[in-house]
Amino acid sequence: MPEPHVLVVDDEKSLRDFIRRNLDVRGYRVQTAANGLEALALITTENFDLIILDLMMPHMDGLETTRRVRETSIVPIIILTALGEENDKIRAFDLGADDYLTKPFGVEELLARVRAVLRRSSWREIPKGDERHVLQRAGVTIDLDQRQVTHHGQEIDLTPTEFELLHVLMRDAGIVLSHRDLLHRVWGPEYQDEVEYVRVYIGRLRRKLERDPLEPELLLTARGVGYRFTRE
C-alpha cells in the first residue's frame, strides 16, 4: 500500500518542519507550502491524500484556500487554529474542512488526528453477509460499492465523512442516534465530546439533500439527544 501523501500549509517554517519531520519518520510522504497560493499550485499538479492547513496566512488564508479546494476536490482537510479563532474554525467546517488541531499541539495529538481523518476517507469494506450494498430511503439512494449518492435520481457530491454519516443514519432509519454514538461510529473512538462536528455535518447534508434545510424532512433532530433519518 503506497504511503499517504500529505500537504502541509503554514507560513511558520518551524511548524511546517515539525509536522513534516514527524510524519516523514512514520512513513508519510510530505510536501509543504507557505501559503494558500502555493498550496493551490501544488494541488493542481499533485494528488494528495490529506491537507493540513493553517487558517491565518498571508496572500491567501486557510478559509479561502479551503473554499477553493472544495470547488474541485474532496481531499480531507485538517485546519490548524489558534486559541480564540472559534468563529473561523466553524466557518472552515462550513466550507468543507474535516477536522482541526488547536495550537500548540503535541506529536501524539497530531498523529491521532491524521490517522482518524485518513481512516474516515478510505473506503469502508462491507461486512461479509451484509447484502445491503444499496440503501434506498425517501428518494435517497446510497450505493456503497460505488460510493455514490443520488436524490430523486440526481447525483449528490459528498465528502467521505458526509457519506459515512449519511450511511449510518440511513442504515438505522427511524432510530434516533445520539451525538456520542454518531461520533463514535463515524469519526472514531478518539472523538467523544466534539458535538459540534455532528451539528456542522448534519447542516452540510441538509443543504445538499433537503428542499428547505431550515425545515428538514429527511434528517430530523431529536432535541438534546441526536438525529435520525426519516422513515418512509
Image (cartoon, helix red, strand yellow):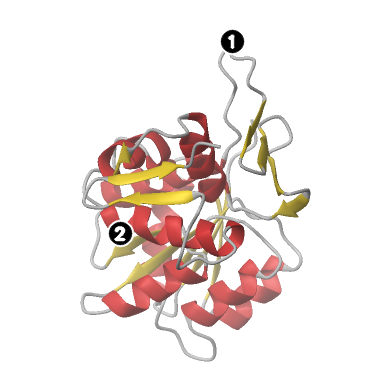
Q: Are marks 2 and 1 in contact (CB under 8 Å)?
A: no
Q: Secondary structure at mark 1?
A: loop
- Choose between 198 and 125: the one closer to the eye: 198
Could one spot residue 51 in this view of the protein? no
- Determine the residue positioned at 54% across, 72% down: 66
Q: Can you give x and y, in whole percent of width and height, for residue 113 in the image?
A: 37, 48
Q: Quadrant of residue 75?
A: bottom right
Q: Can you give x and y, in whole percent of width and height, for residue 194 in the image?
A: 26, 53
Quarter of the image that includes the N terminus: top right
Q: Which mark is residue 196?
A: 2
Q: Can you give x and y, in whole percent of width and height, for residue 143 in the image?
A: 69, 34
Q: Is residue 76 left or right of residue 143?
A: left
Q: How many marks?
A: 2
- Determine the residue positioned at 71% across, 66% down: 72
- Determine the residue positioned at 59% across, 14% down: 130
Label 1, residues with CA under 10 Å away: few <14, some 14-19, many ≥20? few
**Residue type, numbered disc 1:** Lys
**Residue type, numbered disc 2:** Glu
Spot the residue most to the top. Answer: 129
Label 2, residues with CA under 10 Å away: few <14, some 14-19, many ≥20? few
Spatial CA distance of label 2 from label 1 is: 33 Å
Vertical placement of residue 36 versus 118, above or below: below
- Determine the residue positioned at 30% across, 46% down: 226
Q: Which mark is residue 188?
A: none
Q: Quadrant of residue 184?
A: top left
Q: Is residue 102 left or right of residue 117?
A: left
Q: Is residue 191 left or right of residue 122?
A: left
Quarter of the image that includes the C terminus: top right
Q: Secondary structure at mark 2?
A: helix
- Which residue in the protein does label 1 denote? 128
Q: Earlier in the sequence, mark 2 or mark 1?
A: 1
